[in-house]
Amino acid sequence: MLYRKKWPLIIFLVPSLIFLVIFLYIPFLNNIKNSLYDMTTPVLLQGQTWKFIGIENYKKMLTDPDLRIAIFNSLKMMALTVIFQVGIAFVLAVMVSQTKRMQQFFRTVYFFPVVISATAIGLIFKLFYNYNGGMLNQLLEMVGKSPVNWLSPALAFIMVAIPTIWSYVGFYFVIILTGLSDIPEDIYEVASIDGCSKFKQVFYITFPMLRGVLCTCVVLAVTGALKVFDLPWVLVPNGAPQGLTHFLGTYMYQSTFGMNNYDYGSALAVLIVILGIAVSRGINIIVKPENQA
């Protein structure tokens, strides 16, 4: 055992547990409580109390068309992050792992978008998509094409998804590249001697030996898609156009602070937490590494 005595562990674990209880679990329980009351008037006068309405906010969710759009968009973003964020990161990591001298350079280049504020990225892409004078429309005009409304109802979701996915490819790239460095080179050398092609090496060696790493990346990508907020909010405020680009996070924020509907916002926060736990648990069961099965 690393620690023969338990008290050093307790000294370090208890403060973090207290921190979690105060700043995570108590606010979450308070959210559950708030979702059961009518908080249309957030500031009470002396002697007033909020009216208990039970599960009315949760019943409202069943018939809320904007919430359905937000859930559907979040689910689509989950699928896109797994396919493109993790998928592109895996392909890039496999290719870069073959270049021994330039690995640090590529690590820096691909990871750089991760350290940029999502708000700044949203603003940059908003300038790209701008109908009047935006970079994309300037390029179209240079080749004789008419400008395009990139944030129209038909294109808005894709235009939001592109920077959201792009900004975190480097994060998973670094994780996967680190996992690749732990695979012994001898295995690939023996496979090459036996006539195994590079593609087969990736399929039969890299994939199985990276299963635990890829499982972690998929869980992080899926739960991260549930927390998407700042970039879409800057790029398309209030779910514009027509609420079609709302995600769970943006819709919760607008309901709570834009519409002053604090009780419904609290219920949405509870929904997001429950969905996050359920989805991450489901993904863990589906793609659980073999040695944990």
Image (cartoon, rainbow, N blue to C red):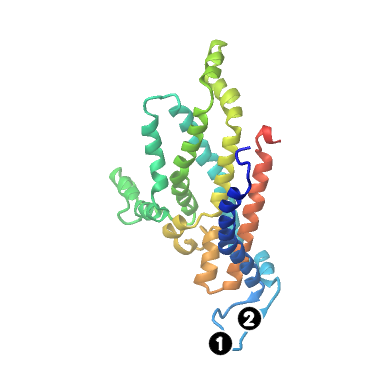
Q: CA distance from mark 1 to mark 2?
A: 11 Å
For image coordinates 63% across by 81% down, the residue present is 50
Mark 2 highlights which residue?
A: 50
The count of marks equals: 2
Give the x, y percent position of residue 85.
Answer: 50, 41
> Which is nearer the eye, 127 or 170?
170
Query: Amino acid under label 2?
Result: Trp
For label 2, the SS is: loop
Instruction: Give the SS element for disc 1.
Output: loop
- Residue situated in front as seen by the camera: 167 or 65: 167
Q: Does residue 268 appear in the picture of this structure?
A: no
At 33% from the left and 50% from the top, the residue drawn is: 137
Question: Would residue 231 be found to the left or right of residue 13 on screen?
Answer: left
Q: Which residue in the structure is indicated by mark 1?
A: 45
Label 2 packing within 10 angstroms: few (<14), some (14-19), many (20+) = some
On the image, the x and y values in percent for residue 256 come to 54, 70
Q: Which sits earlier in the primary sequence, circle 1 or circle 2?
A: 1
Q: Are marks 1 and 2 in contact (CB under 8 Å)?
A: no
